Image (cartoon, rainbow, N blue to C red):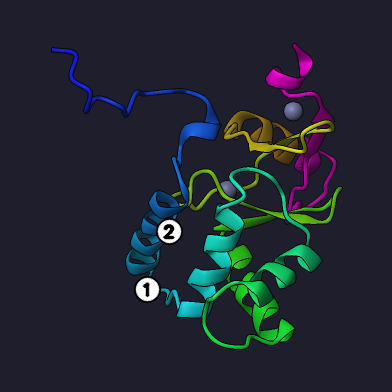
Amino acid sequence: MLGMSQTHLHCTSPEHHVHDAADFIAAVERACTQRGLRLTPIRAHVLRLIAEETGQPIKAYDLLEKVRLSDGPGAVAPPTVYRALDFLMMNGFVHKLESINAFVACHHPDSAQHSVPFLICNRCHKAVEMEDAEIVTALESRARALGFMPQRQVLEVHGLCERCAN
Ligand SMILES: [Zn+2]
Ligand SMILES: [Zn+2]
């Protein structure tokens, strides 16, 4: 039967792991419960504002502006927003893209593994998080072979996304 209700098709693209902001917040809420973390109203609010960008990285300045203009929890001072951001980044729900100094929601908030490459489109600025443990492991083992103790990987690949390249 081909019912209209069958809208959730399986897709291998990392863009489709989380469908919209509401799904994303629900996934993060589940992850927080599982890991004993507290998603306070301000944390949830900041997360929602980032998630609503759907893959478009947002700069801290623009995020503060969105918080100011939104009807979220009262008047929120910038340090409070930054603390909420820290919590979200520390727990892998939001990632900072170092090369463009902007924030993006994680594509797979249930996972604890986030040392993954990002593909960043130079034209539409969409950022896609690759989940590729092989790349992470390869870098890690090559570094260790040189006697280097890796602690954090930042891997951001710039180029044109499929849509912009065609
Ligand atoms: Zn992630
Ligand atoms: Zn693009």
Q: Is residue 133 above or below residue 63?
A: above
Q: Provide the residue span drawn in magenta.
A: 142-166
Q: Secondary structure at mark 2?
A: helix
Q: Quadrant of residue 87?
A: bottom right
Number of numbered labels in the structure image: 2
**Quarter occupied by residue 25:** bottom left
Q: Judge depth for marks 1 and 2 and give the one in front.
A: 2
Image height of 23 relative to 82, above or below: above
Q: Which residue is mark 1?
A: 36
68 in magenta:
no
Mark-to-mark CA distance, 1 and 2: 16 Å
Where residue 132 appears, x then y in whole percent? Answer: 60, 31
Say if the magenta span includes residue 156. yes
Residue at image position (83%, 47%) is 147
Residue of label 2: 25
Say if residue 21 shows up in the picture: yes
Residue 40: x %, y % from top left: 45, 79
> Which residue appears at 53% of the width and 77% of the height?
72
Q: Which quadrant, please, contains the C terminus? A: top right
